[in-house]
Amino acid sequence: MSTLRALAKAQAVAAGVAQPVATVRHLHLSDRPLVLVPLAMAGEANAPLAAMVGTARDEARLLVVPQPRNRDQRFAFAAELAAIVLPYLDSLRGVSEAVPVDRGKDVRYRYVDAPQVLVPNPAGVTFLRLFGRSTRFRRPDGDYPVHPSVPLLGRWLTFFAERAEHPGSAALVAMTEALTLHWATGQSAVEDLHLPALLGWIDPPTGSTGAEAAARAEDPTVCPPAGPATDPDFDNRRLAPAMAAYAEAEDDPAARAAAYAELERLLRDQLAPTWELMWRGVGLLRALPPGARVAGRWDGDKDAFTGYAEHVDDGGRPQPRRDGAVAAAVRLHRLERALASYAVQRAYDDPLVMAEHRLTGEAFVGDVTLADPKRVDDSGKRPVLRPRIQVVTTEPVAVPVGATVYSPARPSQKAKVVFLTPGADGKTEVVLELSGGMGRGLTAPPGTVPEVGERLCYTTLSDAYLPAGNFPATEETPWTHGGPPAAAPATDAPARDLAESGDGDPAEEWS
């Protein structure tokens, strides 16, 4: 936990309400997100019990699995969910936009928007990941066939789960993580995973403190768990008898319909409070202004959505169960680059986030006291414009002479530390030599060089492009890392295909 977040948590306890740790919203919010509240059966491996799903607060659809242990009912649930999710995806594929590439010499096309799925907590993300893994290899023919939409749903759920691992992506968002990114509560990080308690701290009722609202929200009779887990008391006292009544009424259509209606009512009562909390959270996030670089990260989600939609349309194969050695290294490298860029972008967008780096000495804020915008360096083969400015700061400067720093106000401009002069009054004079972001001439355009009196932040954090690493092809790696063995043994192709598809024993573990 960072120093400022720890301080914000202490202030939340003292004030009785959550404290903001961001001044802008660091994620994109779609105009029409798909909210999905899943519920899983206790004691089963990711067996779906129910789900409430929809794109508007007053358009919730409830899907119920009366007998989650029944394989046919589970895949019927998957088909029902696909009938909601797949049309939602198709609705975003109608219009494309041209994106210039190769410095404007060519263009590529992507969809103008992308889907966004919101779930209550990280456990909801895990549920969708496992649900996608258990459905994307199913077949609409052969042994144990499923509806044709089921494997397609599984592939898209896997796509969303993979995007959820990508730092800065907003394709699949856990509401608790989105809220704690912007507010600090007076409770632990584990308690923040409970959506009702978290919202109790952020937006407590009038006349109540956050701690009191969170304590009431943790009572399952007041607000049931936010899925996919269920309350054990509810399972034993209400759900189990209702499921037993449905199973016993197999030969009586009227009794079976009545038992199903009762089961549906119980599950709706369990999911409806969380459904309302999800939209309440959306409202709180929507009230924050978006950060300047949020749109750029959403463009990445649009690119990913367009690319995978084209892959599916072209008959591409489902995602593999496991990445090979090279593919895993490439994926890890891509995520590390995205994480570094996401951290810098958040700091550039938000002074509260940048304050963390000021505490560690990676950034400082000061006033420009001297400026020489016309300085030219003629020591090289040709003269180049190299203005210098002097910044006076009262903050500790842990940046060495010769280091390169950047300002969020002019991110394309580099500033090299030329001199550091500590003063007796606790102030430090920092002389910076500027390059970039001033055109190619020997005269800087107005506004490109900081003026005297301007207050600026400089940091070692850079949002510059990070080149991708070089990785060998799979066939060029040793057999220990996925390359071809010296003598590949003969394999039974049908058996291998069946193992890869997952269409084996019907008693196969659901997850």
Image (cartoon, rainbow, N blue to C red):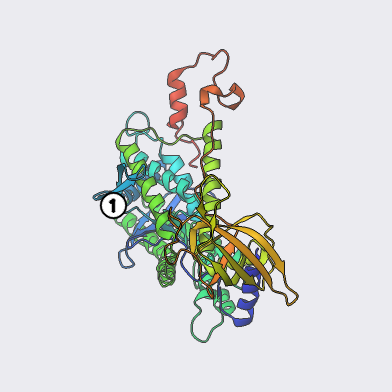
Name, please, the residue furthest toward the bottom. 207
Percent coordinates x, y for residue 173 in the rendering? 45, 57
User: Which residue is at 45% across, 61% downward?
Assistant: 444
- In this view, the residue farthest toward the left is 94
Determine if residue 63 is in view. yes
Image location (x, y in percent) of residue 319: 43, 36
Would residue 12 appear left or right of 385 to someone viewing this image?
A: right
Answer with left or right where residue 39 lies relative to residue 489.
left
Q: Nearer the viewer, residue 33 or 356?
A: 356
Residue under circle 1?
Answer: 92
Q: Does residue 264 lie above or below 474 as drawn?
A: below
Viewer-nearest residue: 378 or 394: 378
Give the total of numbered labels: 1
Residue type of the residue flagged with mark 1 = Leu
Q: Secondary structure at mark 1?
A: loop
Residue at the image point whose x is 75% and y is 75% from the top: 424
State the quadrant of the N terminus.
bottom right
Observer-nearest of 140 and 154: 154
**Above or below 115: residue 213:** below
Q: Residue at x 56, y 78 (%)?
A: 17
**Neighbours of disc 1 within 10 Å: few (<14), some (14-19), many (20+):** some
Residue 410 image point, x, y percent = 48, 62
- Quarter of the rendering containing residue 315: top left
Q: Vertical placement of 319 versus 46: above or below? A: above
Please, which residue is most extreme toward the right here? Answer: 424
Q: Left or right? Give the position of 165 relative to 425.
A: left
State whether residue 323 appears in this view.
no
- Residue 176 in percent (x, y) is at 51, 63
